[in-house]
Image (spheres, rainbow, N blue to C red):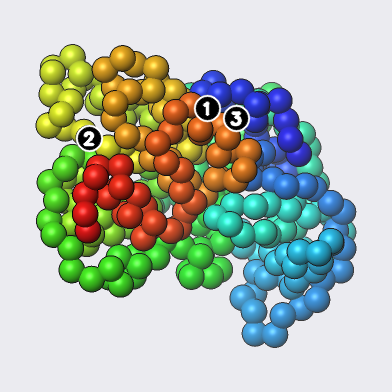
Amino acid sequence: METKILLENGTNELEVLEFTLAGNAYGINVAKIREIIPYQPVTPVPNAHPSIEGVFMPRDVMITAIDLKNCLQRGESESGGLFIVTNFNGLDMAFHVDQVVGIHRVSWTEIIKPDSTISNSDDGVSTGIIKKNGKLIIILDFEKIVTDINPETGLKVQEIEEMGNRNRNDTPILIAEDSALLNKLMVEALHKAGYVNLTHTENGQQAWDLLSQWKTEGKLQENVQCIITDIEMPQMDGHRLTKLVKTDDVLKKIPVIIFSSLINEEMRRKGDALGADAQLTKPEIGNLVRTIDGVLGIEA
Protein backbone atom coordinates (compact mmCIF):
# COMPACT_ATOMS: atom_id res chain seq x y z
CA MET A 1 0.00 0.00 0.00
CA GLU A 2 2.71 2.46 -0.93
CA THR A 3 1.16 5.88 -1.36
CA LYS A 4 2.41 9.26 -2.49
CA ILE A 5 2.50 10.61 1.02
CA LEU A 6 5.27 8.21 1.98
CA LEU A 7 7.54 9.96 -0.53
CA GLU A 8 7.05 13.36 1.07
CA ASN A 9 8.98 14.64 4.04
CA GLY A 10 7.92 16.62 7.08
CA THR A 11 4.45 17.60 5.82
CA ASN A 12 2.80 16.90 9.20
CA GLU A 13 0.24 14.81 7.32
CA LEU A 14 -0.73 11.19 7.33
CA GLU A 15 -3.12 8.89 5.55
CA VAL A 16 -5.74 7.08 7.60
CA LEU A 17 -7.46 3.95 6.34
CA GLU A 18 -11.09 3.93 7.46
CA PHE A 19 -12.63 0.52 8.16
CA THR A 20 -15.73 -0.74 9.92
CA LEU A 21 -16.46 -3.16 12.73
CA ALA A 22 -20.02 -3.87 13.86
CA GLY A 23 -21.18 -0.76 12.01
CA ASN A 24 -18.69 1.58 13.68
CA ALA A 25 -15.93 3.54 11.92
CA TYR A 26 -12.31 3.10 12.93
CA GLY A 27 -8.96 4.12 11.47
CA ILE A 28 -5.35 3.00 11.16
CA ASN A 29 -2.30 4.89 9.90
CA VAL A 30 -1.59 3.68 6.36
CA ALA A 31 2.14 3.62 7.21
CA LYS A 32 1.47 0.54 9.37
CA ILE A 33 -0.22 -1.42 6.57
CA ARG A 34 1.51 -3.94 4.32
CA GLU A 35 -1.55 -5.10 2.40
CA ILE A 36 -5.27 -5.79 2.62
CA ILE A 37 -6.44 -9.28 1.69
CA PRO A 38 -9.73 -11.17 1.76
CA TYR A 39 -10.39 -13.24 4.87
CA GLN A 40 -8.98 -16.75 4.70
CA PRO A 41 -9.22 -19.68 7.10
CA VAL A 42 -6.63 -19.74 9.88
CA THR A 43 -5.13 -22.49 12.00
CA PRO A 44 -6.13 -22.09 15.66
CA VAL A 45 -3.32 -21.97 18.22
CA PRO A 46 -3.87 -23.97 21.43
CA ASN A 47 -4.11 -21.92 24.64
CA ALA A 48 -3.80 -18.65 22.74
CA HIS A 49 -5.27 -15.36 23.89
CA PRO A 50 -9.05 -15.15 23.15
CA SER A 51 -8.46 -12.33 20.64
CA ILE A 52 -6.08 -14.44 18.56
CA GLU A 53 -7.97 -16.29 15.82
CA GLY A 54 -4.94 -18.31 14.78
CA VAL A 55 -2.09 -18.22 12.27
CA PHE A 56 -1.84 -18.42 8.50
CA MET A 57 0.81 -18.13 5.78
CA PRO A 58 -0.38 -16.13 2.77
CA ARG A 59 3.14 -16.40 1.37
CA ASP A 60 6.29 -17.55 3.16
CA VAL A 61 5.74 -15.53 6.33
CA MET A 62 3.67 -16.78 9.24
CA ILE A 63 1.19 -14.16 10.36
CA THR A 64 -0.91 -14.01 13.53
CA ALA A 65 -4.57 -13.21 12.89
CA ILE A 66 -6.22 -11.01 15.51
CA ASP A 67 -9.97 -10.67 15.96
CA LEU A 68 -10.25 -6.91 16.31
CA LYS A 69 -13.93 -7.11 17.17
CA ASN A 70 -13.03 -9.29 20.16
CA CYS A 71 -10.29 -6.84 21.21
CA LEU A 72 -12.85 -4.04 21.30
CA GLN A 73 -15.36 -6.15 23.22
CA ARG A 74 -17.82 -6.09 20.30
CA GLY A 75 -18.31 -9.84 20.10
CA GLU A 76 -16.45 -12.20 17.81
CA SER A 77 -15.89 -12.01 14.06
CA GLU A 78 -17.28 -14.68 11.78
CA SER A 79 -15.81 -15.94 8.52
CA GLY A 80 -15.68 -13.28 5.85
CA GLY A 81 -14.57 -9.68 5.85
CA LEU A 82 -10.96 -8.67 5.36
CA PHE A 83 -7.53 -8.96 6.91
CA ILE A 84 -5.53 -5.74 7.29
CA VAL A 85 -1.96 -7.07 7.30
CA THR A 86 0.35 -4.78 9.27
CA ASN A 87 3.97 -4.42 10.22
CA PHE A 88 5.03 -2.38 13.26
CA ASN A 89 7.29 -3.00 16.24
CA GLY A 90 8.99 -5.50 13.94
CA LEU A 91 5.91 -7.78 13.98
CA ASP A 92 3.71 -9.05 11.12
CA MET A 93 0.04 -9.27 12.13
CA ALA A 94 -3.36 -9.37 10.46
CA PHE A 95 -6.39 -7.65 11.94
CA HIS A 96 -9.79 -9.08 11.03
CA VAL A 97 -12.27 -6.31 10.08
CA ASP A 98 -15.68 -6.18 8.40
CA GLN A 99 -15.14 -3.69 5.58
CA VAL A 100 -12.66 -1.13 4.29
CA VAL A 101 -14.21 2.23 3.42
CA GLY A 102 -11.30 4.24 2.01
CA ILE A 103 -8.30 6.43 2.73
CA HIS A 104 -8.34 9.95 4.15
CA ARG A 105 -5.38 12.28 3.96
CA VAL A 106 -5.36 14.46 7.06
CA SER A 107 -3.10 16.77 9.01
CA TRP A 108 -2.04 15.78 12.49
CA THR A 109 -3.57 19.09 13.61
CA GLU A 110 -7.02 17.68 12.65
CA ILE A 111 -6.72 14.77 15.05
CA ILE A 112 -8.55 15.28 18.30
CA LYS A 113 -6.89 13.72 21.32
CA PRO A 114 -9.53 11.69 23.23
CA ASP A 115 -10.17 12.96 26.75
CA SER A 116 -10.05 10.82 29.88
CA THR A 117 -13.72 9.84 29.60
CA ILE A 118 -12.92 7.99 26.37
CA SER A 119 -9.33 6.92 26.81
CA ASN A 120 -7.15 6.98 29.91
CA SER A 121 -3.46 6.18 29.92
CA ASP A 122 -3.86 2.60 31.06
CA ASP A 123 -7.02 1.29 29.42
CA GLY A 124 -7.71 3.34 26.30
CA VAL A 125 -7.17 1.93 22.82
CA SER A 126 -7.80 5.17 20.93
CA THR A 127 -4.99 7.56 19.98
CA GLY A 128 -7.24 10.13 18.35
CA ILE A 129 -10.49 10.95 16.57
CA ILE A 130 -11.02 12.60 13.20
CA LYS A 131 -14.22 13.97 11.70
CA LYS A 132 -14.82 13.28 8.02
CA ASN A 133 -18.03 13.95 6.11
CA GLY A 134 -19.91 14.51 9.35
CA LYS A 135 -18.73 11.17 10.74
CA LEU A 136 -16.37 10.48 13.64
CA ILE A 137 -13.58 7.96 12.95
CA ILE A 138 -11.75 6.54 15.97
CA ILE A 139 -8.06 5.92 15.32
CA LEU A 140 -7.05 2.83 17.25
CA ASP A 141 -3.86 2.34 19.24
CA PHE A 142 -2.73 -0.89 17.63
CA GLU A 143 0.48 -1.03 19.68
CA LYS A 144 -1.59 -0.97 22.87
CA ILE A 145 -3.94 -3.65 21.50
CA VAL A 146 -1.02 -5.96 20.71
CA THR A 147 0.71 -5.27 24.04
CA ASP A 148 -2.51 -6.12 25.89
CA ILE A 149 -2.59 -9.47 24.08
CA ASN A 150 1.10 -10.16 24.68
CA PRO A 151 2.93 -7.89 27.17
CA GLU A 152 6.26 -9.24 25.88
CA THR A 153 5.81 -7.06 22.78
CA GLY A 154 5.81 -3.89 24.91
CA LEU A 155 8.64 -1.72 26.17
CA LYS A 156 11.19 -3.98 27.83
CA VAL A 157 12.26 -2.01 30.90
CA GLN A 158 14.14 -5.07 32.17
CA GLU A 159 16.69 -4.50 29.38
CA ILE A 160 17.94 -1.54 31.41
CA GLU A 161 18.37 -3.63 34.55
CA GLU A 162 20.50 -6.07 32.55
CA MET A 163 22.91 -3.22 31.78
CA GLY A 164 23.95 -3.15 35.42
CA ASN A 165 24.79 -0.10 37.51
CA ARG A 166 25.22 3.14 35.58
CA ASN A 167 26.36 6.56 36.69
CA ARG A 168 23.87 9.39 37.16
CA ASN A 169 23.85 11.76 34.19
CA ASP A 170 22.34 15.26 34.21
CA THR A 171 22.45 15.84 30.45
CA PRO A 172 19.05 17.42 29.58
CA ILE A 173 16.89 15.32 27.24
CA LEU A 174 13.60 16.37 25.64
CA ILE A 175 11.05 13.60 24.91
CA ALA A 176 8.07 13.90 22.56
CA GLU A 177 5.71 10.93 23.02
CA ASP A 178 1.90 11.10 22.97
CA SER A 179 1.22 7.82 24.80
CA ALA A 180 1.00 8.61 28.52
CA LEU A 181 1.84 4.99 29.34
CA LEU A 182 4.89 4.89 27.07
CA ASN A 183 6.02 8.30 28.29
CA LYS A 184 5.88 6.99 31.85
CA LEU A 185 7.76 3.79 30.95
CA MET A 186 10.42 5.68 28.99
CA VAL A 187 11.03 8.09 31.85
CA GLU A 188 11.26 5.17 34.30
CA ALA A 189 13.67 3.30 32.03
CA LEU A 190 15.89 6.30 31.33
CA HIS A 191 16.02 7.13 35.05
CA LYS A 192 17.22 3.58 35.71
CA ALA A 193 19.85 4.10 33.01
CA GLY A 194 21.11 7.20 34.82
CA TYR A 195 19.45 9.88 32.67
CA VAL A 196 17.50 11.92 35.21
CA ASN A 197 17.18 15.37 33.59
CA LEU A 198 14.16 14.70 31.37
CA THR A 199 11.46 16.97 29.97
CA HIS A 200 8.56 15.05 28.46
CA THR A 201 5.94 16.46 26.10
CA GLU A 202 2.81 14.93 24.56
CA ASN A 203 3.47 15.82 20.92
CA GLY A 204 5.81 17.51 18.50
CA GLN A 205 4.06 20.86 18.82
CA GLN A 206 4.64 21.01 22.57
CA ALA A 207 8.27 20.03 22.05
CA TRP A 208 8.71 22.66 19.32
CA ASP A 209 7.12 25.37 21.49
CA LEU A 210 9.61 24.59 24.28
CA LEU A 211 12.56 24.55 21.88
CA SER A 212 11.49 27.91 20.44
CA GLN A 213 11.10 29.35 23.94
CA TRP A 214 14.50 28.11 25.11
CA LYS A 215 16.12 29.41 21.93
CA THR A 216 14.58 32.87 22.42
CA GLU A 217 15.66 32.92 26.08
CA GLY A 218 19.17 31.73 25.23
CA LYS A 219 18.72 28.68 27.45
CA LEU A 220 19.03 25.81 24.96
CA GLN A 221 22.23 24.27 26.33
CA GLU A 222 20.89 24.01 29.88
CA ASN A 223 17.49 22.60 28.81
CA VAL A 224 18.10 20.24 25.89
CA GLN A 225 21.11 18.42 24.48
CA CYS A 226 19.23 15.50 22.92
CA ILE A 227 15.72 15.04 21.50
CA ILE A 228 13.83 11.72 21.46
CA THR A 229 10.67 11.72 19.38
CA ASP A 230 7.93 9.34 18.36
CA ILE A 231 6.56 9.68 14.80
CA GLU A 232 2.80 9.31 15.29
CA MET A 233 1.56 12.21 17.44
CA PRO A 234 -1.38 14.63 17.27
CA GLN A 235 -0.81 18.32 16.45
CA MET A 236 2.70 17.73 15.09
CA ASP A 237 4.33 14.43 14.20
CA GLY A 238 7.95 13.46 14.80
CA HIS A 239 9.00 13.88 11.19
CA ARG A 240 7.75 17.47 11.10
CA LEU A 241 9.52 18.15 14.41
CA THR A 242 12.75 16.67 13.04
CA LYS A 243 12.49 18.80 9.89
CA LEU A 244 11.93 21.99 11.90
CA VAL A 245 14.91 21.24 14.17
CA LYS A 246 17.29 20.24 11.39
CA THR A 247 16.48 23.24 9.18
CA ASP A 248 17.07 25.73 12.01
CA ASP A 249 20.61 27.16 12.09
CA VAL A 250 20.72 27.11 15.89
CA LEU A 251 18.79 23.95 16.73
CA LYS A 252 20.24 21.66 14.05
CA LYS A 253 23.23 20.77 16.24
CA ILE A 254 20.96 19.00 18.75
CA PRO A 255 20.90 15.22 18.12
CA VAL A 256 17.44 13.91 17.20
CA ILE A 257 16.62 10.25 17.85
CA ILE A 258 13.40 8.90 16.31
CA PHE A 259 12.01 6.11 18.51
CA SER A 260 8.93 4.66 16.83
CA SER A 261 7.01 1.49 16.05
CA LEU A 262 6.93 2.59 12.40
CA ILE A 263 10.62 2.26 11.54
CA ASN A 264 10.85 0.21 8.36
CA GLU A 265 12.99 0.61 5.24
CA GLU A 266 10.78 3.30 3.70
CA MET A 267 10.37 5.29 6.91
CA ARG A 268 14.09 5.01 7.65
CA ARG A 269 14.87 6.64 4.31
CA LYS A 270 12.41 9.40 5.17
CA GLY A 271 14.01 9.99 8.57
CA ASP A 272 17.49 10.03 7.03
CA ALA A 273 16.37 12.63 4.47
CA LEU A 274 15.07 14.82 7.29
CA GLY A 275 18.41 14.65 9.11
CA ALA A 276 17.58 12.37 12.05
CA ASP A 277 20.75 11.34 13.89
CA ALA A 278 19.38 7.87 14.73
CA GLN A 279 16.19 5.86 14.21
CA LEU A 280 15.16 2.97 16.45
CA THR A 281 12.24 0.57 16.52
CA LYS A 282 10.11 0.31 19.63
CA PRO A 283 10.15 -1.43 22.03
CA GLU A 284 13.96 -1.78 22.17
CA ILE A 285 14.62 0.57 25.09
CA GLY A 286 18.08 -0.93 25.67
CA ASN A 287 19.14 0.12 22.19
CA LEU A 288 17.69 3.56 22.85
CA VAL A 289 19.92 4.02 25.90
CA ARG A 290 22.99 2.84 23.98
CA THR A 291 22.13 5.25 21.16
CA ILE A 292 21.73 8.17 23.58
CA ASP A 293 25.14 7.26 25.02
CA GLY A 294 26.54 7.30 21.50
CA VAL A 295 25.14 10.62 20.26
CA LEU A 296 26.16 12.32 23.51
CA GLY A 297 29.60 10.72 23.54
CA ILE A 298 29.06 9.17 26.96
CA GLU A 299 30.75 6.01 28.10
CA ALA A 300 28.35 3.73 30.00
Contact flag, marks 1 and 2 (Cβ < 8 Å): no
- Depth order, front residue of 50/89: 89
Give the amino acid type for the residue marked by disc 2 in the picture. Answer: Gln
User: CA–CA distance between discs 3 and 1?
Assistant: 17 Å
Q: Residues within 10 Å of mark 3 (few under 14, many from 20)?
A: some
User: Which residue is labeled 1 in the image?
Assistant: 273
Q: Determine the residue positioned at 72% across, 30% down.
A: 3
Contact flag, marks 2 and 3 (Cβ < 8 Å): no
Left/right of residue 15 with respect to residue 1 in the rendered view: left
Q: Position of residue 21 (x, y in %)?
A: 72, 51
Quarter of the image with the C terminus in it: bottom left
Q: Position of residue 245 (x, y in %)?
A: 36, 23
What is the secondary structure assignment of the residue under circle 1?
helix
User: Which residue is labeled 2 in the image?
Assistant: 225
- Depth order, front residue of 53/190: 190
Report whether residue 107 is seen: no
Please tell me in which quadrant of the rendered image residue 100 appears.
top right
Give the amino acid type for the residue marked by disc 3 in the picture. Answer: Leu
User: CA–CA distance between discs 2 and 3?
Assistant: 29 Å
193 vs 23: above or below: below
Give the amino acid type for the residue marked by disc 1 in the picture. Answer: Ala
Q: Earlier in the sequence, mark 3 or mark 1?
A: 3
